[in-house]
Amino acid sequence: RGLEVELEEMQNEMENKEKQMKRAMEAEKQRNEKPKGPNRMKPNFRRPRSSSRPKVKESRKSNPMLEPSPESEAAPPHVAALQNEMITLRKQFELVRHTSMDDILSLHRQSEEWSNQASRAVTASTAEAELLREKLAAESAMRLKLLNELQDIRGTVRVYCRPNQCTPGKGKPIIKIPTHDILVLNEDTSPVSFKFDRVFSPGTSQYEVFSELEEPLISSLDGFNVTLMAFGQGGSGKTHTLLGDVNWDDAIDGEGGNDELPSLKSHGVQLQAVQQLFTIAGHRTDRYKDAFSITMVEVHNEKLHDLIAGTPSAESYGEVVLCETRDRASRDKRRGGGEAAVAESAAGWRKGKLEIRTDVDGNTVVQGLVSVAVGSFQEALAAWREAIAQRAERLRSQGLDAKKHERKTNVITTVNIKSVNIATGVGTEGKLQFVDMASSDIVRGAKKAREDREGAVQEVAEEDDTQFGNKSIDAFNDVVNARIQFDRSVPYRNATLTHLLRDSLEADTKVLLMCCVSSEQAHVAD
């Protein structure tokens, strides 16, 4: 293109020179003409022919355009200079034209060569990228294997402790933390030490707590079952550790719509974990296809209550969970109406009671529970806010105190994760559970029903007898003791909570227990 522009400029310059030369020659011709009159002599146009002129004319064989005309020989010096300059420009134009034509013709050959080189480079880079992708998959699998082995070495069951800060004016704290895994109680009077996998200081932030628990929690994205349980007496910070701080200021000032939903500040472990899961899933969309769903169930007085059912998220994206047993699967197969039977059962269970069952794969399922599919962290956060608002409204309508109700209630939030490898088509199913357990306040001297040798049931009151005030916590303690002693029969069905958490307390499930304790002297017994 640069050559073409240069040629156009030279052509325009040559045309301008020719015009100037013609105007100069016309002006000179007009000056040389004499006025016609009667006394004017008749011009003699005959000139003596020289013998040398024809020979000079015949000897010229160059381009006639480049030859000076007879008029130019008789022209003034400035006209001759313009003509010589035009001839020079014509020669330069011809040279540039031939050069540009050669360059243009060579561009085609060079473009073909460049195209071949680019094609070979793309092929080589594609092969290298495929090789690197295979190496990355192998390294990721090896890293995942080593990470899981390391976590197994550290233990599939880990116990953490998080003391809360002592209220000002309530005396001196009764807890000391000499190391990162040792907690000492009553150091000044009768010290008792407890060892944990990690003891957090009272001023530890929510992010520091999540950073310690991040690796096992995120492994649920690889197909593992992970459970985090918050255990402790009332007011020790279980809900704050798991969920965060629930702010009702906006709900009080609002007038319907989304303004009535509470805000969640200082996000707890479960909100940060779900946000991290969506972040990782967003970074690997080219390799995996991930799907997330959330269920929330409340256990109060051995009864189940769905916290998500009836919320706007459940109405828009909810799906009723059905349990497929061996008997039901065979019966539907004989009838030949599998999908119709499932739809009929879903319609019946939408308004029916919740029931804990075991499916064909041996997993514990709450039939009739509403599962909400979420595609982003904001949708999951909205589901939590709607569930909390609906629960508060239900307690308000029943005239119940929310704090007293929460002390006796277990809340289980389950995040089901399904991942499919796009290249291989291999899929995994993981489950991440968060259990906000009821308060573990103890009762001294309580009456317990016991059986004598004859089988009669009697109530015995003992001053030194100590038990948990909540039945589900007492049953959970029995299950843990049975698991420690490797009993063949573990009493999972003694309570709704342990029955519901059966999958989380056996097999290769990673169990994380967060013990939330108080630092005040009044709670030393608990």
Image (cartoon, helix red, strand yellow):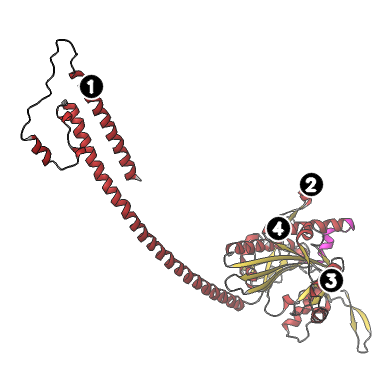
Residue 29 screen position, x and y as percent: 20, 22
Q: Is 230 displayed left or right of 466 in the figure?
A: left
Quarter of the image for the C terminus: give it: bottom right
Question: Disc 1 on helix, strand or loop?
Answer: helix
Q: State the residue position of label 2.
A: 254
Disc number lying in front (3 or 1): 1
Q: State the residue position of label 1.
A: 27
* Type of amino acid under label 4: Glu
Say whether disc 2 or disc 3 marks the residue closer to the N-terminus.
Answer: 2
Residue 39 belongs to magenta span: no
Q: State the residue position of label 4.
A: 379
Residue depicted at x 17% and y 26%: 75
Question: Disc 2 on helix, strand or loop?
Answer: loop
Say whether disc 2 or disc 1 marks the residue closer to the N-terminus.
Answer: 1
Whether residue 204 is visible = no
Q: Is 472 displayed left or right of 273 in the figure?
A: right
Residue 345's label in the rendered image is 3
Disc number lying in front (3 or 4): 3
